[in-house]
Amino acid sequence: MPRLLTFAGMSYEKQGFARRLSDAMQARGYEAKPGVLLKQFNSRYTGRSIAFSTASKWLRGMILPEQDKLQVLAELFGVEPQELRFGHRGRNRAAQPPGAWQAVGARDRQVIDAFLALTPKRRELVGELVAELSKPLNAKD
């Protein structure tokens, strides 16, 4: 693999990743700031939490995330991992139409994030409540 040119310790590859990460965050309604990234990432990642400095270095193009972390970032911000990492869509994949998730507003994302932070038992309770509320209303209600 050819060596990439660097500027002030950053490769074009890392700078490109930082730009794509920032763009993906903004496209989903998040500010591209280390504190925002830290909170969102750590709420979803099941491994050891990242530090503020790690989130900052990702956004400044200083380091690249490991593969397991890249997967979580891609899922968080609605892009394919290879697109986030390399900047292009997979060539063999059929184009996917925009899904309903792209239309989810900031408030709904906060609710979903809060739900995902719940314990499995509490998630089950919320699921039962939503199922009950989703049933058609009877004349008695």
Image (spheres, grey):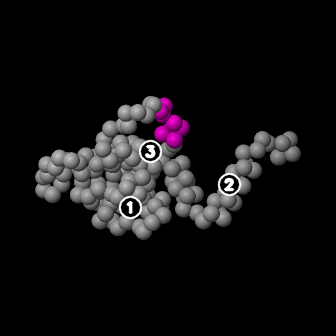
Q: Which of marks 2 and 3 is nearer the N terminus?
A: 3
Spatial CA distance of label 1 from label 2 is 27 Å
Task: Quickly name the residue at label 1.
Answer: 38
Q: Is disc 1 surrounded by few (<14), some (14 to 19) or many (20+) residues within 10 Å?
A: some
Amino acid at pointer 1 = Leu
Q: Residue at image x 33%, y 60%?
A: 55
Residue 112, given in percent of the width and then of the height, sits at: 55, 53
- For the residues bearing labels 3 and 1, Cβ distance under 8 angstroms: no
**Label 2 secondary element:** helix
Q: Does the magenta stretch include residue 32?
A: no
Between discs 3 and 1, the one toward the N terminus: 1
- Tell me where residue 69 sits by quadrant: bottom left
| Position of 8 relative to 52 (above/below) | above
Graded by Cα atoms within 10 Å as few (under 14), some (14 to 19) or many (20 or more), the crowding at tag 2 reads few
Given residues 92 and 129, the one toward you in this image is 92
Kind of residue sitting beneath label 2: Gly
Q: What residue type is labelled 3?
A: Gly
Residue 34 seen from this side:
no
Using the numbered discs, state the Cα–Cα distance from disc 2 to disc 3 in whole angstroms: 23 Å
Eyeballing the image, is 68 above or below 24?
below
Q: What's the magenta region?
A: 96-103
Q: Mark 2 points at which residue?
A: 127
Q: Along the horizontal axis of the image, is 119 left or right of 18?
A: right
Viewer-closest of 90 and 123? 90
Mark 3 surroundings within 10 Å by alpha-carbon count, few (fewer than 14), some (14 through 19), many (20 or more): some
Where in the figure is residue 113, as x and y percent of width and height?
52, 56
**Residue, disc 3:** 78
Query: Where is residue 53 shown, x and y percent of the image?
Result: 29, 65
Q: Which residue is drawn at 37% across and 66% down?
A: 50
Farthest right residue in view: 140
